[in-house]
């Protein structure tokens, strides 16, 4: 077996990716990836492809990490500012998840614009309770299909001023209307979804486990479990 086929470093590479985003707001550099793979960037790149195949992250055509949920390396409509770090949020769900995942940032400012009317929004999101406000999150793509084109899925999971803006936006874009969550429901969805992702040994939820999580968050139904 060549070093490039060695899967022993996959988990170290995964953790290096997530910790670079959590700490610095960016993907790891080449040297940081090599350090995580016992000094071999080639091994690290092979690990990145296996991690992408397992849906732990998303690569672009240049083998750069563009998504490591809840973090993004590309702008998708959300800036998330902590006391020490600034991130791109992958979507409404991911932006609300960041303060629950990053130990040093218990509270963040989530900034975005309504896709329909372009009204700016700034919400303080913390670990204790959902922010107040009339805004809603729209999820056009059911969970069973979110990874069919995950970059598109993230780009359309947005915050709106209210449901009337959602209705106008889907009519304008031709997208099907999905499910709409108020801020408390969005906060419950995000609260524990990525728990443990910065540590070694993290395991993605199986479909039945995900369905249990959604139901506990008050989100039962075929949209979340179909």
Image: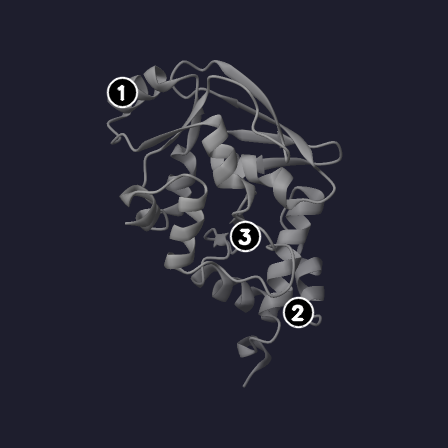
Residue 180: tell me if it is visible.
yes
The quarter of the displayed image where residue 17 is located: bottom right
Q: CA distance from mark 3 to mark 2?
A: 16 Å
Q: What residue is disc 3 on?
A: 64
Report which quarter residue 80 is drawn in: top right
Within 10 Å of disc 2 (Cα), the crowding (few <14, some 14-19, many 20+) is many
Q: Which residue carries the number 1 mark?
A: 172
- The residues bearing labels 1 and 3 have C-alpha atoms spaced at a distance of 33 Å
Extreme-bottom residue of the structure:
1
Mark number for residue 8? Answer: none
Element marked by disc 1: helix
Query: Eyeballing the image, is 124 above or below 203?
Result: above
Instruction: Give me the residue at 72% from left, 65% from top.
Output: 35
The vertical placement of 23 against 130, above or below, is below
Looking at the picture, how far across and down is residue 158, in whole percent?
43, 29
- 225 to the left or right of 94: left
Residue 91 seen in render: no
Query: In front: 83, or 1?
Result: 83
């Amino acid at each position: 077996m060549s070093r490039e086929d060695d899967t022993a470093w996959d988990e170290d590479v995964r953790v290096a990716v997530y910790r670079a985003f959590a700490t610095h707001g960016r993907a790891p550099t080449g040297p940081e990836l090599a350090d995580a793979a016992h000094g071999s960037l080639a091994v690290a790149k092979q690990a990145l492809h296996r991690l992408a195949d397992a849906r732990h992250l998303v690569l672009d055509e240049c083998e750069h990490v563009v998504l490591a949920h809840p973090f993004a390396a590309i702008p998708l409509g959300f800036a998330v500012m902590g006391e020490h770090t600034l991130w791109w949020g992958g979507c409404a769900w991911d932006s609300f998840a960041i303060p629950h995942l990053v130990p040093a940032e218990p509270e963040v400012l989530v900034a975005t614009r309504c896709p329909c009317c372009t009204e700016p929004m700034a919400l303080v999101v913390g670990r204790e309770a959902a922010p107040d406000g009339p805004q809603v999150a729209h999820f056009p793509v059911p969970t069973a299909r979110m990874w069919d084109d995950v970059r598109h899925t993230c780009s359309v999971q947005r915050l709106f001023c209210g449901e009337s803006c959602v209705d106008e936006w889907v009519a304008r874009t031709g997208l099907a209307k999905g499910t709409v969550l108020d801020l408390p429901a969005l906060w419950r969805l995000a609260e524990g979804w990525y728990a443990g992702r910065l540590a070694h040994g993290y395991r993605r939820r199986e479909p039945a486990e995900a369905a249990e999580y959604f139901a506990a968050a008050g989100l039962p139904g075929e949209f979340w479990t179909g």
